[in-house]
Image (spheres, rainbow, N blue to C red):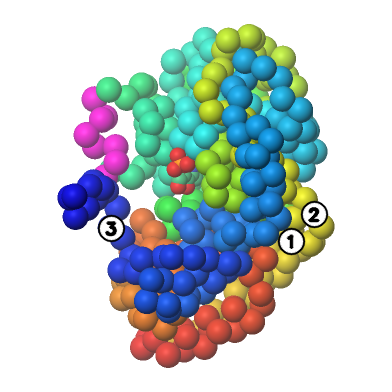
């Protein structure tokens, strides 16, 4: 047998995670860590939450899978619950399997409905590795080999209203990540977001919010959509939707949804009964346990308490937080790991990212603050 048949495509943490419960994970050597990396921002309500495990097991025993060729009650229910949860006029949803797939299809809807062939993004945003999202993404590492086959795309400087003219009558849609996560926890401000909405309306372009990281409660509200009075035409969501079972979604306003016809969108696994059961359980837990409020409180605590050791500024909100450190963040990440804390780096070499579950206990923040204080500044 080959020693490792997996292709290495990720620079991995030097630990092998064996099990996880809540915000704690344990490696094969039996060492425990606080998971402020949140399993890649996926474990929105913590690892192996009993309500999710139960929902998955019960649904798998009843019907593990049937495609969209038949209606399934749990799919209808999941759609209803997600749209109710999101609010803000997002009354229809299409399910898929990942963030890139959600963004790809949101762009396809925009191109089809506007008849236009240019897309737009914001410099610093990150939208996934399929062709349309990549064309709107800034990360040169992933873009470079494919640039020659991208569609026509323009990118605006963030929070720069002078660039709004780039959204014109040729643009089908602009995709906006309201807080750049991989880009280094950089927030698009209310003035810019409002101006983008206004400009889209003036020229007939659609506004897509990429809420793959900010969505499903991470910021202490269901989605950023609606914040600052800005309502996008489409919202994409993935990561924590089913707390670890692959699931993506595009949420639509009635206006956009009413123009989508039979056969326009499709994905074999999209809206499978198991992820749908998990999604319903995620929303149940968030609502039953008051986790939106908890995410806000955790964010406030992290902003107040984590200005310690090498940290010079705490960025972001809710459970999407950036620690701007003195010098490079990588050695700080490594030191924190040796002290029992998993964190993420970002495209900004001096910003460490925290995406903990929104039910993380408050004392974990105190423990992280104490660990930071031990890291040389
Ligand atoms: C904001 C954002 N959009 C899209 C994606 C792509 O999601 P996926 O990896 O599920 O395709 C990511 C992944 O990290 C992301 O952070």
For the residue carrying disc 3, how many other residues have a C-alpha within 10 Å: few (<14), some (14-19), or many (20+)?
few
Assign the magenta stretch its main secondary structure: helix
- Seen from the viewer's position, the closer of residues 205 and 7 is 7
Instruction: Give the quarter of the image for residue 286.
Output: bottom right
Q: Which residue is mark 1?
A: 291
Does residue 349 appear in this view?
yes
Look at the numbered disc 3 and give the secondary structure of its residue.
Answer: loop
Q: Which residue is mark 2?
A: 287
Whether residue 126 is situated above or below residue 369 in the rendered picture: above
Alpha-carbon distance for marks 2 and 3? 36 Å
- Seen from the viewer's position, the closer of residues 70 and 203 is 70
Residue 376, percent across and down? 36, 88
Q: Is residue 260 left or right of residue 170?
A: right
Q: Which residue is mark 3?
A: 11
Q: Is residue 243 left or right of residue 98?
A: right
Look at the numbered disc 2 and give the secondary structure of its residue.
Answer: helix
């Amino acid at each position: 047998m080959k020693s490792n048949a997996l292709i290495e495509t990720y620079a991995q943490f030097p630990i092998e995670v064996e099990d996880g419960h809540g915000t704690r994970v344990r490696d094969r050597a039996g060492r425990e860590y606080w998971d402020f990396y949140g399993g890649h921002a996926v474990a929105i309500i913590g690892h192996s939450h009993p309500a999710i495990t139960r929902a998955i097991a019960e649904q798998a025993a009843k019907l593990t899978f049937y495609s969209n060729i038949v209606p399934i009650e749990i799919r209808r229910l999941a759609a209803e619950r997600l749209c109710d949860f999101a609010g803000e006029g997002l009354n229809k949803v299409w399910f898929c399997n990942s963030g890139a797939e959600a963004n790809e299809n949101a762009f396809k809807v925009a191109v089809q409905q506007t008849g236009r062939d240019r897309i737009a993004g914001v410099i610093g945003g990150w939208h996934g590795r399929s062709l349309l999202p990549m064309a709107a993404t800034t990360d040169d590492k992933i873009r470079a080999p494919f640039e020659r086959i991208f569609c026509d795309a323009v990118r605006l400087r963030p929070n720069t209203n002078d660039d709004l003219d780039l959204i014109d009558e040729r643009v089908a849609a602009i995709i906006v990540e309201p807080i750049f996560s991989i880009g280094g926890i950089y927030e698009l401000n209310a003035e810019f977001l409002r101006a983008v909405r206004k400009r889209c309306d003036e020229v007939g372009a659609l506004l897509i919010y990429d809420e793959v990281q900010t969505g499903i409660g991470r910021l202490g509200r269901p989605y950023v959509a609606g914040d600052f009075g800005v309502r996008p035409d489409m919202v994409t969501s993935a990561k924590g939707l089913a707390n670890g079972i692959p699931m993506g979604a595009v949420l639509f306003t009635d206006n956009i949804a009413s123009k989508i016809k039979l056969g326009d969108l499709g994905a074999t696994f999209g809206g499978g009964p198991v992820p749908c059961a998990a999604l319903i359980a995620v929303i149940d837990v968030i609502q039953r346990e008051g986790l939106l409020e908890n995410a806000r409180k955790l964010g406030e605590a992290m902003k107040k308490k984590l200005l310690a050791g090498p940290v010079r500024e705490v960025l972001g909100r809710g459970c999407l937080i950036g620690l701007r450190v003195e010098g490079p963040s990588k050695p700080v990440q490594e030191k924190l790991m040796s002290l029992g804390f998993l964190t993420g780096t970002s495209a900004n070499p001096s910003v460490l990212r925290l995406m903990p579950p929104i039910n993380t206990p408050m004392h974990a923040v105190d423990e992280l603050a104490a660990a930071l204080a031990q890291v040389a500044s």
